[in-house]
Amino acid sequence: MSLARAIGRCALAVVTVASAIGIGAAASSTATAQPAPPDSPLCAWRFMSNGQALNVAFPDTNATYWVLPYALRPGDRIELSGTYPKARYFSLNTYGTRLDTVDTLRDAQIAPDPGSVNPFATTQTGVGGMWHATVVNGPADHSRNEMSALPTGDAAQAGPVGFLILRVYVPNDAASAAGGVPLPDVKLVYGGNTIPMPTCAHTFDPSNAASGPVGAIVKEAINQAIARAASRAFTPGTPEAVFVSPKSTASLFPNGDNKYLGAGLTYQPGRI
């Protein structure tokens, strides 16, 4: 299977929408504006989710998530190179095809590069540095900043799709969702070849796509998937407006560092 087909299958419908709507435009040196060239299908961090954009799976309103789909074969890996953000918290989470947590590396666990300092693992202020991490298709060693890409069993197969999510909670500068640093650089090691994946210039914007027929289909599919997952979160008979620990957060991209409480509500007109 070619690299483009392997990665493209991860989110084909959404990538098709993003390509169809022609996100972005750049002005030429003349008075006539020319459309900017589209991002490569292999660019990284195509999807960004927060309380306003791609608001799915109940994102925290003080957090931003960047999503990287992948389809790795045995022996393949994803190499990440980043700078510690200036934020309350950040983490890397991997998910399988069923959107359940596979592995988690949080800020204080991510060892710094030689000569750098992890500001989340020290009481010093004003420090920061670089880090590297690897998503591997098989057993992972956290002491080496490795993460498992797929659930046990699936890792031996070429078919299952996975997702890597970068989370940043409460950045010091509210105007910089990523915490004042660039998104991590991404390289895909595929079949022994190292292929850089430049950061996408444009994230997928469902508000632009929703007006078209394809966008409407994607939006409805997402809504139905979330509704099904949410309906399984509570035991039948759980009283409304009573917070309980959900019996399942599967299919909702749960953060491996969090424990969740939730309350079910049924909308009724005129009722507060």
Image (cartoon, rainbow, N blue to C red):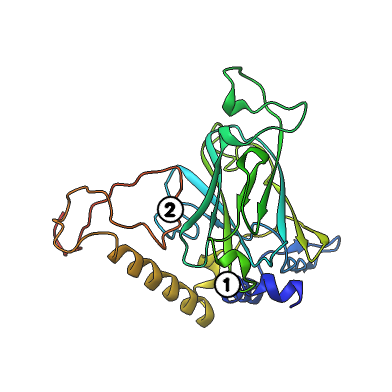
Q: Amino acid at mark 1?
A: Val
- How would you rate the neighbour count of disc 1 (Cα within 10 Å): few for under 14, some for 14-19, many for 20 or more? many
Instruction: Tell me the residue at 64%/57% (across/down).
Output: 45
Q: Nearer the viewer, residue 182 or 124?
A: 124
Q: Nearer the viewer, residue 27 or 165?
A: 165
SS label for mark 1: helix
The image shows residue 175, relative to residue 103, as above or below, that is above
- Asked if residue 108 lies left or right of residue 263, the reply is right
- Asked if residue 80 lies left or right of residue 251, the reply is right
The alpha-carbon separation of the residues under discs 2 and 1 comes to 21 Å
Earlier in the chain: of badge 2 and badge 1, it is 1
Residue that mark 1 sits on: 14
Give the image quarter of residue 188: bottom right
- In this view, the residue farthest toward the top is 124
Residue that mark 2 sits on: 254
Instruction: Tell me the residue at 72%/61% (across/down).
Output: 76
